[in-house]
Amino acid sequence: MSEIESVIGEEQAIDMAIDSAIYDFLAKKHKIYAEIQVTDLVYCPRKAYFEKKYGKQNNNSSWGLFVGILLHDVLLEAMAEYLDGEAEVLTVEVFEIHGKLWKVFGMCDLLTPNYILELKTTSYLPEQPKLSHLMQLEAYLRFFDRDYGYLVYVERHYGKRAIFKHYRDEALYNEFLDRLYDFTHALVTDIPPSHIDQSLCKLGKHKCPFYSYCHSQP
């Protein structure tokens, strides 16, 4: 019997072990590589800003995230082998903004000699790719110098998939840059970014863990 089992009982110890394993796994998968990541800018910059200010906070959706990441990683590893690509390739771009150098880190899911592929596991297939995902892919096309890429959505429950091809889009990349300038200004002035994704404020029964911080701001 382990020390913890002698204190709280076997069933509670098993339950706690599961929670701890999920927490440790997600903590490793969400390592902050630097001040700014591409994903900080394409989803909800305000949430990313508050995460950097107050640290990551749990919003009680860990299990779904855990399952989604596991499926994502298993598929990605096999796809990289089939498509003669490299999985989870990390790079960094340096931008000069108002006389200061800012590093923006990005990790594409799959890099091939011809294109980039971003894999998204989802509970339902979208009819069109999400703007945040397109912007993420757009940034990677620039960072890794590719002309086109693919967004691939795979349904978690039945394995159905949707594949969207995307070519470089100057307007979309300019929007990404606007978010970057806004985000760096927020980090310097400690004023939350103006860009916010209202659709992420509430997901089902769960609120964003920074909801109260965000909605108290102008």
Image (spheres, rainbow, N blue to C red):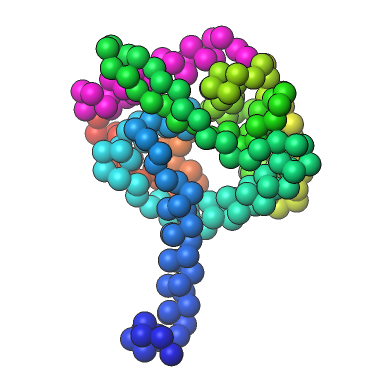
Asked whether residue 187 is drawn in magenta, I would say: yes
For residue 7, what is the image quadrant? bottom left
For residue 197, what is the image quadrant? top left
31 over 19 or under it: above or below: above
188 over 30 or under it: above or below: above
Q: Quadrant of the C terminus?
A: top left
- Left or right side of 23 for 125: right
Q: Residue at x 52, y 35 (%)?
A: 90
Whether residue 166 appears in this view of the structure is no
Q: Residue at x 57, y 36 (%)?
A: 89
Q: Residue at x 72, y 23 (%)?
A: 114
Question: Predominant secondary structure in magenta?
Answer: helix
- Left or right side of 97 for 138: right
Q: Which residues are magenta?
A: 168-195
Nearest the eye: 77 or 207: 77
- Left or right side of 196 for 132: right
Q: Quadrant of the N terminus?
A: bottom left
Asked whether residue 192 is drawn in magenta, I would say: yes
Q: Position of residue 59 (x, y in %)?
A: 40, 51
Q: Position of residue 94 (x, y in %)?
A: 41, 20
- Left or right side of 58 for 15: right
Q: Position of residue 74 (x, y in %)?
A: 67, 52
Q: Position of residue 18 (x, y in %)?
A: 49, 69
Whether residue 157 appears in this view of the structure is yes
Q: Residue at x 75, y 43 (%)?
A: 81
